[in-house]
Amino acid sequence: MTRLSTGQADLDLVLGGGFERGSMVVITGPPGSGKTILAQQICFAAASAEHKAVYYTTLSESHAKLIEHLREFDFFVPGHLGSHVEYVHLGDLLCDNTSNDLAPMVDEVIRKAFDDQPAVVVIDSTKMLRDFVSDHDLRRSLYDLTSKVAHSGAVLFLVGEYTAEEAEVRAEFALADGILELSYRPREPIDRRGLRVVKMRGTAHVQGTHTVHITRDGVQVYPRIESLLTDEHQPDPGRVPTGIHGLDALMGGGIPHSDATLVLGPSGVGKTLGCLHFIAEGLARGERCLYITFQDTAEELISMAGRLGWDFTTAHADSKLVISHVPVGNLDLDGLASVARHNLTEGATTRIVIDSLAEMANTAREAERFPAYLRSLLGLVRSAGATLWVTSETRTIGPMEEPLAGLMFLFHNVIQIRYIEHCSAIGRTINILKMRNSGHDYTIHDYHVTADGVAVGDQIEQITGMLGWSALRDCTAPVPHDQDVH
């Protein structure tokens, strides 16, 4: 059966393909959650000259105010008012009704549904109809309305601010083929909005609460990644070169295809430079790459790469390199996953960098959800055949802690970069903590940061503190006779 699209691919995905024609859907949620914007957005997306959208208002905002508020959204087309999207005020039919009967209103909506054959019919707000009739009469009127409008093929939306308790007993919800529940949660620094499909008859909709952003594009829905099933993927044989001189040799020839690699290290140790090497190597091989960053902007990363001799400007302009800068204040797990998912499906992306995971985990403030989310994100990338390079910050001074306690097992490979004391100088070291199903070097090597980027140096023969009990120290450095090396 052909379904009515919302005009937004991700929302259609959540709904299981859109709305069934002839169905009745309740859109509910508190003030500010985006109900009216979503309903009007669907109207402008679905309406055509042959099958318009009819938007009925009861006793809510005036049409002039509704349209004025729409002008800030890109989906609003002023030239489609009347010809494609028609606003009709039901206030006179309700207020002049001396018999306390909704029959005049119901008859008018049904008549127009069959005369105009609209694709969409919206009544906003349905909850206000209770001011005019009893619950019994409203149930009877809504049954008459929904059953007859269904025969016209239009999708009927009833919009209202219902509480959870009202949703359990009101007739609108019992008669509905679908229920969309929008939510609004104040939280610093950015408030959170969500959408949950409570009910959608005959459809395998995506469960869970999905993130909602209201932008110039309107209500944007980002599917909850844990609810999306990914296909099993058989990785290609062979290795992915990192682009970091000397590192591939420590990893048995490079990273196995489709592996997720975690790079641990304190601030300033050279993690981001390693990310740039990984991306530059991919671009040199003609691959499409995605760089997700929470600190450095696209301009800063491109400039940094330019100083190292890599032309990221051209690759960025040609969409061979996509840089998604997400300020930590705006960080949202579902929004981030959506960036990765769309780049994987639309552009055959083969390399993805996330810099860094510690910021992502801490800023999102969804500790209980994060393990399942991370597992799903890694599965999404792997199922698409892409290779993931992720950084995560550790403590700079003192013993190294495990920043992702209980989650490091999700990564196929873990690389550790640390500072080391060389007498009165500070150096850097690198070692491979683990590689799943692959041989690798187990020793510690110098890690050099130069004007050309980063490179792996010689093995350090004598060193203490390897397991993080103290700072790394070069045992060849002279130590005062009254002190021990720990």
Image (cartoon, grey):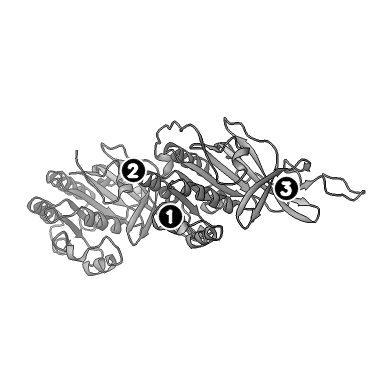
Q: Residue furthest left?
A: 115
Along the horizontal axis of the image, is 376 left or right of 246?
Answer: left
Q: Is residue 398 above or below residue 463?
A: below
Q: Amino acid at mark 2?
A: Val
Q: CA distance from mark 2 to mark 3?
A: 48 Å
**Residue carrying label 1:** 315
| Residue at the image point whose x is 50% and y is 43% from the top | 388
Count of numbered badges drawn on the protein: 3
Please tell me the numbered disc located at residue 72.
Answer: none
Q: Position of residue 34 (x, y in %)?
A: 33, 57
Q: Amino acid at mark 3?
A: Pro
Inspect this view and state whether residue 120 appears.
yes
Q: Position of residue 282 (x, y in %)?
A: 48, 46
Q: Position of residue 336 (x, y in %)?
A: 45, 50
Q: Which tag, 1 or 3, sits closer to the chain's start? A: 1
What secondary structure is found at the residue carrying circle 2? strand
Q: Residue furthest right?
A: 482
Task: Judge depth for marks 2 and 1 and give the one in front.
Answer: 1
| Residue at the image point whose x is 21% and y is 52% from the top | 46
* Most foreground residue, 168 or 10: 10
Along the horizontal axis of the image, is 232 left or right of 142?
Answer: right
Please tell me the numbered disc located at residue 198.
Answer: 2
* Most foreground residue, 444 or 204: 444
Q: Position of residue 155 (x, y in %)?
A: 19, 48
* Most foreground residue, 449 or 183: 449
Task: Judge depth for marks 2 and 3 and give the one in front.
Answer: 3
**Residue carrying label 3:** 399
Inspect this view and state whether residue 123 appears.
no
Q: CA distance from mark 1 to mark 3?
A: 40 Å
Q: Are marks 2 and 3 in contact (CB under 8 Å)?
A: no
